[in-house]
Image (cartoon, rainbow, N blue to C red):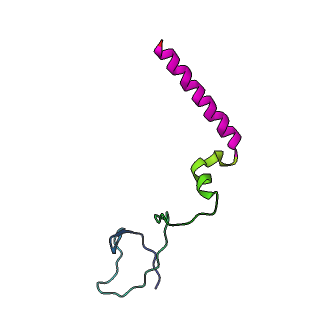
Amino acid sequence: MRKTLIGTVRGNSIELAGDAKLPEGQEIEVTVEFDHPADSTKVLPPGEGIRRAFGSWADDAEELDAFLEWNRASRKLERRDSAE
């Protein structure tokens, strides 16, 4: 029999969501799959981390640079106006 159950790791135990309906003492085999890997040692291909961090701007560095420059300039203007 094969059944997919969702659970949360708590130390060396896995807490299953809902009622698993497994008989007490039943021997089982566990296969682990991660929806969102929490393993920080996972190695990404070169450039993948920065691509994920920048989202839609990952492929448009020039547009990102222009936005950041505009943002810096507008902040400088706000400081000058409030200091006067």
Seen from the viewer's position, the closer of residues 44 and 18 is 44
Q: Residue furthest top?
A: 84
Which residue is drawn at the image coordinates 70% and 44% (left, top)? 60
Q: In this view, does 14 lie to the left or right of 43?
A: left
Relative image position of residue 72 (x, y in whole percent): 58, 29
Which residue is drawn at the image coordinates 32% and 71% (left, top)? 11
Q: Is 26 placed above or below 17 here?
A: below
Specify whether residue 69 is painted magenta. Answer: yes
Q: In this view, does 11 lie to the left or right of 62?
A: left
Which of the 4 quarters of the picture holds residue 13?
bottom left
Relative image position of residue 37 (x, y in whole percent): 49, 65
Which residue is drawn at the image coordinates 33% and 75% (left, top)? 12
Seen from the viewer's position, the closer of residues 82 and 8 is 82
Specify whether residue 23 is painted magenta. Answer: no
The residues colored magenta run 60-83
Relative image position of residue 33 (x, y in whole percent): 49, 72
Q: Is 20 placed above or below 46 here?
A: below
Q: Is 77 placed above or below 37 here?
A: above
